[in-house]
């Protein structure tokens, strides 16, 4: 495999992981962020 293809796959995987982890991280600590909880099931 070419190095460019490997770097492209790593970049895509990193972006997907960041996009998936960001809302989960913010939803877990809404009080620490000082923002309104967007989830309706938040207690």
Image (spheres, helix red, strand yellow):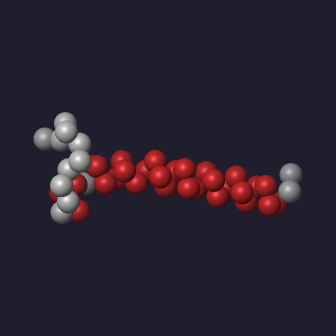
The residue at the point 67 percent across, 55 percent down is 10
Q: Give the camera-side residue of 42 and 40.
A: 40
Q: Is residue 22 left or right of residue 17?
A: left
Residue 2, horizontal then vertical, whole percent: 86, 57
The residue at the point 52 percent across, 51 percent down is 17
Tell how many labels. 0
**Residue lying at the far right of the rendered structure:** 1
Residue 37, horizontal then vertical, whole percent: 20, 50
Residue 32 visible, this angle: no
The quadrant of the picture occupied by the C terminus is: top left
Q: Is residue 17 left or right of residue 37?
A: right
Residue 30 visible, this angle: yes
The residue at the point 19 percent across, 36 percent down is 41
Residue 8, horizontal then vertical, whole percent: 72, 57
Name the image quarter holding residue 29.
bottom left
**Residue lying at the far top of the rendered structure:** 41
The residue at the point 73 percent across, 60 percent down is 7
Residue 36, horizontal then vertical, whole percent: 18, 55
Whether 32 is drawn above or below 39: the answer is: below
């Amino acid at each position: 495999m070419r190095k460019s293809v490997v770097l492209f796959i790593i970049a895509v995987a990193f972006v997907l992981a960041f996009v998936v982890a960001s809302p989960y991280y913010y939803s877990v600590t809404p009080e620490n962020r000082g923002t309104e909880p967007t989830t309706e099931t938040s207690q």
